[in-house]
Amino acid sequence: MRVVRKGITGITITLFMVGFIFLAGATAQEFQWNQFQGTRLRVLASKFAWIDNIKEWVPEFEKKTGMKVNIEVYPFKPLMQKYVIEFSSGNADIDAFMNFKAQTGTRFYDNGWIEPLDGYVSNPQTTNLEFQLSHYFPGYINYSSIDNKLCGIPINAAAPVLFYRTDLFNQYALEAPHTFAEWEMAAQKLTLDIDGDGTKDLFGIGMRGSMVPMAGWQPFLFGFGGRWLDAAGNPIFNSPLGVKSLALYASMLQKSGPPGAAGSGWQEMANLFEQGRLAMYFDTIAHYIYFVDPSKSKVVDKFSLAVVPKGPAGRFPWLGGWMLCIGRQSQKKEPAWLFVQWATGDEISTRIQRKGFATTSISAWNDEQFKESVIPEYPKVAVSTYSLGVPKFLPEVPNPMEIMGYLESAVTRAIEGENPQKTLNEAAREVKRILEEQLNKKLELVF
């Protein structure tokens, strides 16, 4: 069993150039969407905005193909438990399913629950010529691969960006920070007592202190030149570079973050930015839609976005999100592949993108109707971030969920004031133990 994948960007795969020459005459034929008519598919999905749209439009797919699709939607944890129970029992009824690889790791692939898609993508009989992997941001194809095997088609383009208040930056003659040093300085300068009552009521920065705070810390860790694991699979996030990165992350929240930052997740921080209490907010680009909603947001037309500032080693935003997979035990893999390519293709992605959802389709981000409906910096920063990003939200191991708690504790405790070296050393010992256990015996996923 593998434990880690080597290299800064994980797996490097060659994108299929689906525009290559197929068998003589194949390109002249219209793709046969109805070749599996009468088939019934079962799709399992997480409660998520993307699947809500797919459910609304699935009658179009059924009309096009003559198939019927039953989509079952569950909250995240019950869904993961359902996967483990059904796949472990050999159930062949899951034809397609949503998988959040950043948290499930390589376990589904290791256990033989995921069907590699490489052979389907290159087969003109089962793949519409308009479906091309080159239409997706390469980093997300990388993220969706294990051992150079394409294990799913990426759905949503999650990645961290810096939201900042343009009105405040203009008022205090500041520019969007380009470096960690500028970022820290801007956060301190914009932590203010606006109403003059002796208590600070505007805070310079909001980042996660809990609820997977690694989403905030990872760009700092990599930006300083640190990494999660070395080539042999040993934890090195507690190296001097890792300690420096966490020390800065914690210090920025201690000096320029809101009260209770150590116990605040993205929901609390996003709400503070939405209500005008934060000058900057660092988290996933998906939160853009909250800040442009005039019924809730007080910062509509008062904010912009920037790529993660540069650390001593560079810029390293993580890439993550859901992907749509085919169950390896399914008896309807080819019909399921038609559903996967329809649900994740350019046409559907563009329609979802126009609703404010961040997809992994390059053409969706270039859609003129979409670009006219958003602030200009949104697509520009998104595309730049996706080009820079690395698929290393968490260490790529069989079961990241088992080590998340120790990493989260290390970050939260450092924000609370404990020594970062101490918290990271303790986490590294536990992570090393868990990785050795994952290597030596087969464990069930625990959610």
Image: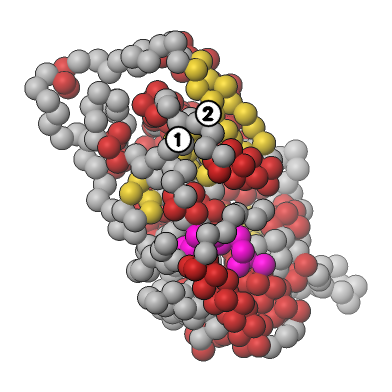
Asked if 362 appears above or below 281 in the picture, the reply is: above
Q: Nearer the viewer, residue 204 or 445?
A: 445
**Which element type, helix, strand or loop, lies under badge 2?**
loop
Residue at the image point whose x is 43% and y is 38% from the top: 328
Q: Farthest residue toward the left? A: 24
Q: On the image, which quarter does residue 294 sit in?
A: top right
Q: In 3D space, how far apart are the residues under numbered discs 2 and 1 (Cα atoms)?
A: 8 Å
How would you rate the neighbour count of disc 1 (Cα within 10 Å): few for under 14, some for 14-19, many for 20 or more?
some
Q: Specify the farthest residue to the right.
A: 197
Within 10 Å of the Cα at label 2, are there few (<14), some (14-19), or many (20+) other Cα atoms? some
* Residue type beneath disc 2: Asp
Q: Secondary structure at mark 1?
A: loop
Q: Position of residue 335 (x, y in %)?
A: 40, 23
Of residue 172 and residue 371, the one placed in the foreground of this image is: 371
- Which quadrant: the N terminus? bottom left
Q: Amino acid at mark 1?
A: Gln
Q: Please say if 376 is above or below 367.
A: below
Q: How many callouts does the rendering have?
A: 2
Q: Position of residue 44 (x, y in %)?
A: 57, 33
Q: Residue at x 30, y 58 (%)?
A: 12
On screen, residue 44 versus residue 149, left or right, reads: right
Residue at the (48%, 63%) spot, across then down: 397
Q: Which mark is residue 329?
A: 1
Is 399 contained in the magenta span?
Answer: yes
> Residue placed at 54% from the left, 48% from the top?
100
Q: Position of residue 355 (x, y in %)?
A: 56, 33
Residue 93 marker: 2
Magenta residue check for 126: no
> Can you tell which quarter of the image residue 169 is in?
bottom right
Residue 62 percent coordinates (x, y):
48, 14
| Segment colored magenta | 394-405
